[in-house]
Amino acid sequence: MPDTLTLNLENDIIFGVYRPGARIIEDRIMEDYGAKRHAVRNAFSELEARGLLIRRPNRGVEVVDFTPDEVDALYDVRIILETAAAERTALPCDPEIVERLDDIARRHEKAVNEQDYSAVFWLNQEFHEVQYSCCGNPRLAELIGKHARAAQPIRVVKYEDKVHMARVVGQHFDIIDALRGTSQSALVAAVRAHLPASAEAYRTLYNRRFGARVQTA
């Protein structure tokens, strides 16, 4: 479990208090969060490891600002990893795990309906951590978690889009139904269908900000 400062900073980055590309100043974080310098540096290191912060020479620590091409590359890797995990998941899945996923999905649906975006985010993360723990390969599950964390600020761009969020809710239940069944191809298809929309939304927003042109790192 992350410490409170790391968790608070992570939430503030994910939900746009600190915008992509923004500099994060140690002294300001110490003042705003009432934290000691060593705690701030530890939080920075943890969030850098998660792909949310980056240290740039002569500029200090900044919030990661992905270009659309970088987002596409990240999601391409996620599709490879997550479909590989689906292919390796024994079916039908343990009923206790399926019921746990169903409970998380229903709480996630309730949070979506109540527009409790923090709960939406954390319940979605919990859902997929449980889901990919079933693949039988802890290293693969760890890699999936690492790349999912890197995608955190990308995923929230459509939280206020009711049609999109209703689709996400439905896709969670599609994954659960596939885990109850015996068709590996159905599970792979359900997992694959769940991934691209946020990346596409990010490209749309990025192009709106900077113009529809190819961006390089």
Image (spheres, grey):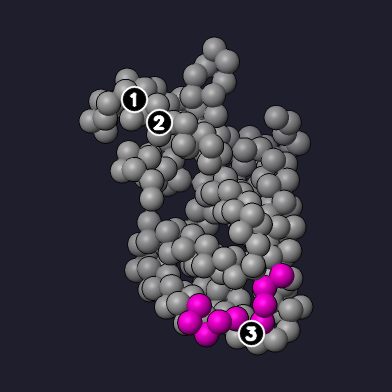
Dot 3 amino acid type: Pro
Choose top left, top right, bottom left or bottom right for residue 29: top left
Residue 122 to residue 182: above or below:
above
Residue for badge 2: 42
Please give the name of the residue rendered at 59% of the width and 65% of the height, measured from the top-left corner.
132
Measured from the top left, where is residue 139 in percent x and y?
64, 54
* Mark 1: secondary structure: helix
Measured from the top left, where is residue 9 in percent x and y?
38, 39
- C-alpha distance separating marks 3 and 2: 42 Å
Q: Mark 3 or mark 1, which is nearer the start of the sequence?
A: 1
Q: Is residue 202 left or right of residue 102?
A: right
Measured from the top left, where is residue 35 in percent x and y?
26, 30
* Mark 3: secondary structure: loop
Tell me if label 2 and label 1 are in contact, CB under 8 Å. yes
Say if the magenta span includes residue 94.
Answer: yes
Q: Which quadrant is the C terminus positioned in?
A: top right
Residue 77 to residue 168: above or below:
above
Instruction: Give the residues drawn in magenta, as a range.
Output: 88-97
Residue for badge 1: 38
* Mark 2: secondary structure: helix
The reply to whether residue 170 is visible in this rendering is no
The reply to whether residue 107 is visible in this rendering is yes
Say if the magenta span includes residue 64.
Answer: no
Please give the name of the residue rendered at 66% of the width and 38% of the height, measured from the top-left corner.
67
| Observer-nearest of 131 and 159 | 131
- C-alpha distance separating marks 1 and 3: 47 Å
Residue for badge 3: 92
Please give the name of the residue rendered at 59% of the width and 70% of the height, measured from the top-left corner.
134
Dot 1 amino acid type: His
Q: Is residue 34 left or right of residue 111?
A: left
